[in-house]
Amino acid sequence: MHAVDGVSFDLDEGEALGLAGESGCGKTTTALALMRLLPYNGKIISGSIVFRGRDLVKASDMRIRKIRWKEISIIFQGAMNSLNPVRNIGQQIAEPIILHEKVEEDEAMKRVGELLELVGINRDRRRDFPHEFSGGMRQRVMIAMALACNPKLVIADEPVTALDVMIQAQILELLERLRKELHLSMILISHDLSVMAETCEKVAIMYGGKMMEVGKTVDVFTDPKHPYTQGLVAAFPDIRGQRTMPASIPGDVPSLINPPTGCVFHPRCKFAFDRCIAAEPALADVTPGRRAACFLYPEVSEVPPRTITMEVH
Amino acid sequence: MIRVRDLKVYFPLRRGLLRELAGRAALWVRAVDGVSFDVKRGEVFCLVGESGCGKTTTGKAILRLVEATEGDVFFEIPTEEYRRYEELRSRGAPDAAARIDAIRRKYSFSWKEQLAWDTQQILTWLGAVAAAFVLGLGPPAFAAAVIPGALVDTGFIIGASLLCGLLIGVIASLPPTRPSTRTPAGLALLSILAFNLLPIVAATGWPATLPNAPSDALGIWARVWGSASFAMLLGVIIAPAAAGGASKILLGRRRETEGLLGIKMRTLRRRLHLIFQDPYESLNPKQSVFEIVSEPLVVNRIAHDPEEIAALVSRSLEDAGLRPAEEFVLRFPHELSGGQRQRVSIAAALALEPDFIVADEPVSMLDVSIRTEILQLMMDLREKRGLTYLFITHDLSLAWILADRLAVMYLGKIVEQGTAEQVISHPKHPYTKALISVVPSPDPRHLAKRTILKGERPDAVNIPSGCRFHPRCPVAFEKCGWSADEVAEELRSLSAGGLLPEIAGIQAQDAGTVAIVMMPGMSPGSAAANLRRVVSENRDSRLALKGIADIRENGDAIHVTLEAWAEPALVELEPGNAVACHLVTRPAEAVPTVTA
């Protein structure tokens, strides 16, 4: 199964990139691949992940272990399930600090106090257990944990899903503030486009494991080029817009085991023509600063057919 | 079509046995705390709010999936009857209660016959005592009849002990019928004492007088005591179940025949239906689509003929957009996509041709690109079948698109109600305003100034006094219901900041006063003057200080008196648009009321 297929993007220092798409489009797999955390049956077949001049795909396990959490950290989806229920949050946040910074527990605990204050939790609560926190507070704990070793890049995987709108706004504001204060780069993964509209400079739209469109958030949302992006943007109801039923994209998300031939989106695309069924479009610049993978634009070329041989264990 | 009046749903909080015996006041989770609204035929009424605001509980209470604690849910009540009900409620005529009950009995889902306390008690007791007798006397009598002579000397004692045990168990286990009555600790003590004393008395008194008493009285005494205590223990253990069962049957029989319950409710329930949030969990994985959709038809005995059932099922499926139906009937839920599952849920809800559907977050688990199709389907069905929806959602942008009218809930109460234009385009309540301001918009050009509220929703057990939103409200003022604890807390934090050097201690005295103790040697006069200055300087940044009405020296201490407050009522400002906020409506009569 090709969960993620031919995804490329750049992220500058201090920049926030949004990775958007529906469930099963490969957003989380991309994030896990970036940290080399794929499950045992997942494998990076080809490509490169260059982080500050170093290719993470080729790096040794030892090297990766040093980079993981120290330089790249992740806020996992679902704070409810990502915290250990039998250890207090202080211990959980201190763990990576002790491992990476080689400091004593006392010093690590001091840092835990600072981190908790940073995310807006009273430092006296570090001895509390996860069940004593509300959903929003647990998410803050997860954020503190991700920031424990002063990383350069934070990947936030659906950080506000399953939270109330008001708590969502609080968490997004916190992330935004921390990003400015600590000069973090961030990859924000979400199925909710409206969350990205307010936090990310750049956005990448994924569908069926492939990248459909990349560009500046404002441009992508106001003038989407790819038919899928157009459909997706139109499908969100807008409380500040017209009171009309949002448009829908007919059909269902494709199965990644039997992906459609050619462009993955063609079975649901209203502009699809012969070429879309026969060949796969490559991501190309359609306007300055905007890349899309759709044959509607003459700049877009075909992806050469690939054969991947892989050993099956 | 549906009128909800003052609906309250409270859930009791479980406590430990010791606290129960100590008899402290019961704690309640006030999930829904006085909600009133009407849903008109053919409209989409939205209930919006954050999680835990009571919207789902309201929806379930309307369908009687949870029992309402108080209040009425009227279904298709004629206008004149309803008008009479309102009149009776507001005026309070001498026989008003009986006449209101007559109306409620006919039309209200939530009406339960309120038996007089003694009647209910007698019914409960009758059942319990009957059960105790049957259980206590039956087995020994049976044994005596079957095995002649086996239990002659000790059987009666054992039987009596069992009976005693049962009665004690019954008494101790009876539920307190009045909310204020608690199981007294004395009763538990009594049962333990009796448990040991009675067999002793019985065993020492009886063997001597029994005919053919053997000479070894001590041996018999020990034997009888042993078996009698065992019988009594057995009695105490079985009794609660027996008593509970018997009295439930007696009370239940009476209730079944009254009001919109039992068979009458079952016929009504066909017209009301529910669509759940999560299509992955609300469908039984072991049932095929056919079984899921046909089950309500079979249970409600709508159709018996297999062909008729098949026809109705395929009609429902096709109405729900699963075409052709033959392709889906034999599938199981895991063979369907998320959108298709939700369509099956809708088809199952449609099978009985209901009039009214409570849709609890029907699309929140679905991907955006298929969400609209489900919503469109629901709206098409409204046109086609004349459905009425109560749409429960946390997503204000969905409510904006779907709702004809909507109500915003906060902590079990409606804070604002009106048409979508009234509430969303021109919100009046500070909570609605804040909530709308933080709803993200997919169009970056629509960026608005966000009002992010501090903190989180308070616990529904300890609901704040006055307006329940005031601790988080950015524009709260004097009359919002600041409690002594909140003001004392704020003063303490000022004191900790070094602004009040003369003050040694701050204590909330009663609901309306905070007492302040001076440092030794400080004069209350200058301290009060300083306190007044500090309070007036910080009033705008620390809103709790606005609750202070007066600062007065009182001997060696300072008394801080708080403003009087009242809980804001939902007041209609324009036709159909009601808001519960003192800032918008005129502050009500400043009579302190204690709701907690």
Image (tube, helix red, strand yellow):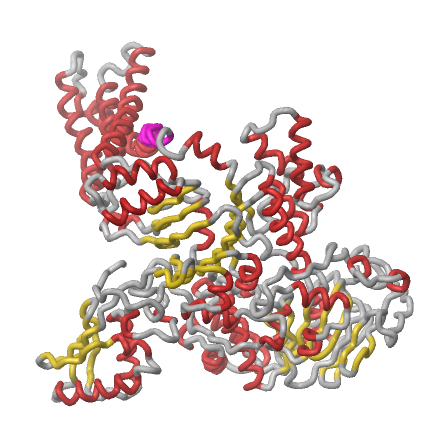
Task: Check the picture and name the quadrant holding the C terminus of chain A.
Answer: bottom right
Q: Which residues are the magenta region?
A: B246-256
Q: Nearer the viewer, residue A252 or B424?
A: B424
How many circles with numbers are drawn on the protein? 0
Q: Quadrant of the N terminus of chain A?
A: bottom right
| Residue displayed at 70% across by 81% down | A11
- In this orientation, does residue A28 appear? no
Residue B388 % position (x, y): 53, 47
Is residue A88 shown left or right of residue B381?
A: left
Q: Nearer the viewer, residue B334 or A131?
A: B334
Q: Quadrant of residue A227?
A: bottom right
Residue A232 seen in the figure: yes
Residue A278 image offset from top left, x and y in percent: 90, 62
> In the figure, is residue B382 to the left or right of B100?
right
Placement of B303 over or under A93, stated as above or below: above
| Magenta stretch encompasses residue B299 | no
Front-most of residues B437 and A255: B437
Give me the residue at 82% from left, 61% from top: A266
Residue B501, placed above or below residue B7? below
Magenta: predominant secondary structure element? helix
Residue B315: image location, x then y, percent: 67, 37
Image coordinates for residue B420, horizontal then vertical, percent: 51, 61
Please give the name of the residue rendered at 18% of the width and 16% of the height, measured from the top-left corner: B214
Q: Is residue A20 above or below residue B523?
A: above
